[in-house]
Image: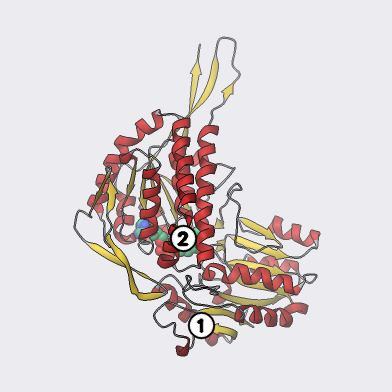
């Protein structure tokens, strides 16, 4: 099956005619499709058409915009089974995880349909006969660049607020998950989105992505992905492009001395091995009270061994493959580092040849104990179902080690000791703190974003806070004199 870009209201090939192929990470013999390998000329064409289209969309007013977003949510809800099956085939997560992501984006569209209606300005008291007002207007052309790990929800949480605020959108999905980009755009078109308002450009980061950062006419860029690419984008952009960067994480679960260990092991299993460990908020470090260290390592090892790996479409499978070959290479590299550093791999690594999984990018859920304090396993983002466990002496040391990484996305604490929990919540340099629940899983109506290398902190994503401020501009207007 061959797919196309969507530019200027038409489905078109890349202007160069080039294509790339995409395969199922659970079975590399399964070709998902051929996608246009876009470049600079495609981006330039998209900027022109979206620039022309957004003023009409903005002029329609909030109810008309909300209607389209509500309709998109309904269409997604009616297509959950079909889209989820393709998400599993393209990205690898299990069908249950894929269904959760798909239904979550319907909720995202509903939330931002409401936000379109709630957008407002303010009025300010002035001497009699005068008034000062703030007027909100769209930013204009918003570029959306997304990763492969949540190909629907990372895109929806950007495209929905951008459209709600009256902007036009240029969407570049990850080259690892182009089919999900295609499906999302189809939903919006079926919901009645004006045709030239949204452009979909497939292609690789160093070509299409880079062109987006250098083509004039893009007013805002919102990116989710790795820190390395985020920094390339930040350096490439001119100062008049508004920029939001949400990047990697090195998330920790802290297990304090009062914790119930079965509960702790279950929380860590879900946070570390759910979504094959490929969530930006996935748990990759466990910092546990020394008194509980041996027992927790044993329980965690048992929990990991209870996971069934395989193609996410197969009944009984609880963990799918890694999404890309690069991910598999990275895991192999870190398993080597663990051995060099003297870490003890209690379970995990690559599957045996006899498991029949050699056609895909499979790894077993992996627990590494006894890692030294200066281990790279405690600092680098691995982005895989690999968790390093370390003993801590007290809460202060837990905070120190949790924060001893360049990232600052999510920390969770397993404890009912309120004073210690509060101390961690108040002191840690992470943007999300979860108590007695996994580092993964956040609410769509609460602000989301990291500190340090996890975000450029220009605006939070998701509910509340200043999401709509990123996608709109405020003008101060003085009436009377
Ligand atoms: P990535 O940085 O490799 O790619 C992300 C996107 O950027 C892709 O669409 C890619 O094509 C594009 N890109 C690559 N080079 C580019 C360039 N030079 N200019 C412009 N765009 C370019 O990330 P990935 O491997 O797709 O995703 C995994 C990363 O995403 C992890 O680091 C993970 O933590 C992070 N992530 C963060 C969050 C969050 O909310 N903080 C959520 C999900 C994933």
Task: Tell which quarter ligand 1 is in.
Answer: bottom left
Q: Nearer the viewer, residue 260 or 232?
A: 260
Q: Residue 96 falls in which quadrant of the image?
A: bottom right
Left or right, 418 with reference to 363: right
User: Looking at the image, is 72 positioned above or below residue 93?
Assistant: above
User: Looking at the image, is 135 positioned above or below residue 175?
Assistant: above
Residue 433 in picture, x, y percent from top left: 66, 58
Left or right, 437 with reference to 334: right
| Residue pictured at 41% horizontal, 37% vertical | 139
In this figure, which residue is indicated by the disc labeled 1?
Answer: 335
Q: Residue 26 falls in which quadrant of the image?
A: bottom left
Residue 168 in view (yes/no):
yes
Q: Residue furthest top?
A: 129
Q: Earlier in the sequence, mark 2 or mark 1?
A: 2
In this figure, which residue is indicated by the disc labeled 2?
Answer: 84
User: Looking at the image, is 249 positioned above or below residue 55?
Assistant: below
Depth-wise, is mark 2 or mark 1 nearer the camera? 2
How busy is the neighbourhood of tag 1: few (under 14 within 10 Å), some, or many (20 plus)?
many
Residue 66 in picture, x, y percent from top left: 48, 36
Residue 244 in picture, x, y percent from top left: 46, 49
How busy is the neighbourhood of tag 2: few (under 14 within 10 Å), some, or many (20 plus)?
many
Q: Nearer the viewer, residue 146 or 420?
A: 146
Residue 279 in view (yes/no):
no
Q: CA distance from mark 2 to mark 1?
A: 32 Å
- Label 2 element class: helix
- The color scheme shown is secondary structure
- Label 1 element class: helix
């Amino acid at each position: 099956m061959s797919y196309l870009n969507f530019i200027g209201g038409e489905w078109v090939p890349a202007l160069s005619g080039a294509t790339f192929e995409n395969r199922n990470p659970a079975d590399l013999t399964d070709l998902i499709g051929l996608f246009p390998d876009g470049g600079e000329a495609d981006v330039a064409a998209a900027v022109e058409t979206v620039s022309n289209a957004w003023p009409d969309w903005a002029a329609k007013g909030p109810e008309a915009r909300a209607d389209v977003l509500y309709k998109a949510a309904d269409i997604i809800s009616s297509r959950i089974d079909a889209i989820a099956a393709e998400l599993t085939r393209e990205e690898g997560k299990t069908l249950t995880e894929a269904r959760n992501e798909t239904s979550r984006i319907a909720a995202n569209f509903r939330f931002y349909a409401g936000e379109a209606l709630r957008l407002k300005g303010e009025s300010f008291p002035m001497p009699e006969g005068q008034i000062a007002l703030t007027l909100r207007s769209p930013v204009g052309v918003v570029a959306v660049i997304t990763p492969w790990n949540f190909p629907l929800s990372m895109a929806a949480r950007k495209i929905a607020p951008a459209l709600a605020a009256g902007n036009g959108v240029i969407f570049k999905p990850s080259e690892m998950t182009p089919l999900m980009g295609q499906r999302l755009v189809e939903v919006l078109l079926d919901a009645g989105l004006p045709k030239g308002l949204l452009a979909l450009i497939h292609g690789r980061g160093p070509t299409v992505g880079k062109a987006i950062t250098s083509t004039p006419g893009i007013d805002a860029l919102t990116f989710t992905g790795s820190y390395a690419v985020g920094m390339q984008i930040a350096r490439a952009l001119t100062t008049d492009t508004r920029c939001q960067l949400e990047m990697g994480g090195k998330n920790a679960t802290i297990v304090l001395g009062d914790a119930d260990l079965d509960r702790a092991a279950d929380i860590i299993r879900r946070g570390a091995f759910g979504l094959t460990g490929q969530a930006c908020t996935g748990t990759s470090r466990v910092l546990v009270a020394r008194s509980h260290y041996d027992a927790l390592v044993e329980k965690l090892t048992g929990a990991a061994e209870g996971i069934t790996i395989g193609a996410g479409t197969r009944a009984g499978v609880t963990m799918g493959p890694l999404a890309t070959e690069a991910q598999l290479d990275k895991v192999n590299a870190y398993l080597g580092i663990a051995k060099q550093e003297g870490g003890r791999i209690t379970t995990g690594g690559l599957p045996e040849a006899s498991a029949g999984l050699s056609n895909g990018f499979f790894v077993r859920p992996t627990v590494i104990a006894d890692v030294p304090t200066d281990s790279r396993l405690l600092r680098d983002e691995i982005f895989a179902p690999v968790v390093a466990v370390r003993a801590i002496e007290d809460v202060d040391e837990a905070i120190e080690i949790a924060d001893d990484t360049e990232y600052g996305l999510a920390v969770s604490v397993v404890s009912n000791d309120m004073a210690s929990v509060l101390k961690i919540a108040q002191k840690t340099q992470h943007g999300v703190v979860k108590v007695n629940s996994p580092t993964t899983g956040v609410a769509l109506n609460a602000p989301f974003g990291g500190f340090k290398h996890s975000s450029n902190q220009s605006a939070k994503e998701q509910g509340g806070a200043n999401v709509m401020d990123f996608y709109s501009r405020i003008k101060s207007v003085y009436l009377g004199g």
